[in-house]
Image: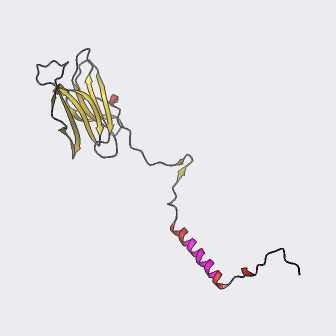
Amino acid sequence: MQPSAVPDLAHTHARPVHWLATATAMAAVVAAAGLLQPGPATATTAAGPQAAPAAAPAPDAAAADYPLDCGRAPSTVARQARGDLDGDGNPETVAVVHCEAGSGTPPSGIYVLTRGKDATARVVATLLDPARRNNVADLAVRDGAVVATVLGYSSPDVPSCCPDQRERVEWRWKGSAFVRTARTDPIAL
């Protein structure tokens, strides 16, 4: 007798236990597929899926009208910082503004800007009034607070060119207003 070129397939006869094992495995695969469904489908445009709406950009400090009386001279935005100060998810702009002066050191004001309904920049708070005769050495927004180094004068006799006091201050939104706190004691320069 000549051996067959095809292997013996006698062991491949299906028994009921084989059918039961196959059915159990298939049921497990179907159950797992039912549990691991993808998320719901979303509509897309020809350009691709729609992104979530982004927060509006921070207001442009150069485009705002400041409550600053410079006479005929224009005002200048000396510094600015951006960040979400009130926790609404939209950034505000904080600007240090002073009148342009031919010489000397004009006093600075610190203003908080937000976007109006028509997307224009508008002043919503004055943190430092220029009438106080202060200057601002630096400005930042950190952890939802405005932080600045304010230069001032110990008396009206000190010339405006040469501030002799320095204070590190912070303004933080509390309820419905900005609250100022000194981060360090005033330092004489």
Q: Does the magenta stretch include residue 22?
A: yes
| Magenta: main secondary structure | helix
Residue 10's place in the image compared with 184, above or below, is below
Tell me, yes or no, if residue 61 can be seen here.
yes
- Image quadrant assignment for residue 178: top left
- Quadrant (top left, top right, bottom left, bottom right) of the N terminus: bottom right
Front-most of 185 and 147? 185
Give percent across and percent down for residue 187.
16, 29
- Image quadrant assignment for residue 122: top left
Q: Which residue is drawn at 53% across and 70% down?
A: 32
Give percent across and percent down for residue 141.
29, 37
- Farthest residue in the bottom direction? 16
For residue 154, side relative to residue 16 (left or right): left
For residue 111, side relative to residue 57 (left or right): left
Front-most of 77 and 50? 77
Give percent across and percent down for residue 92.
31, 38
- Quadrant (top left, top right, bottom left, bottom right) of the C terminus: top left
Q: Residue at x 34, y 35 (%)?
A: 59
Q: Identify the image's colour scheme: rainbow, by chain, secondary structure or one colour.
A: secondary structure
For residue 46, side relative to residue 81 (left or right): right
Q: Which residue is drawn at 19% across and 30% down?
A: 129
- Image quadrant assignment for residue 91: top left
- Farthest residue in the top direction? 102
For residue 102, side relative to residue 59 (left or right): left
Q: Which residue is drawn at 11% across and 21% down?
A: 156
Q: Does the magenta stretch include residue 46?
A: no
- Over which residues does the magenta segment extend? 19-30
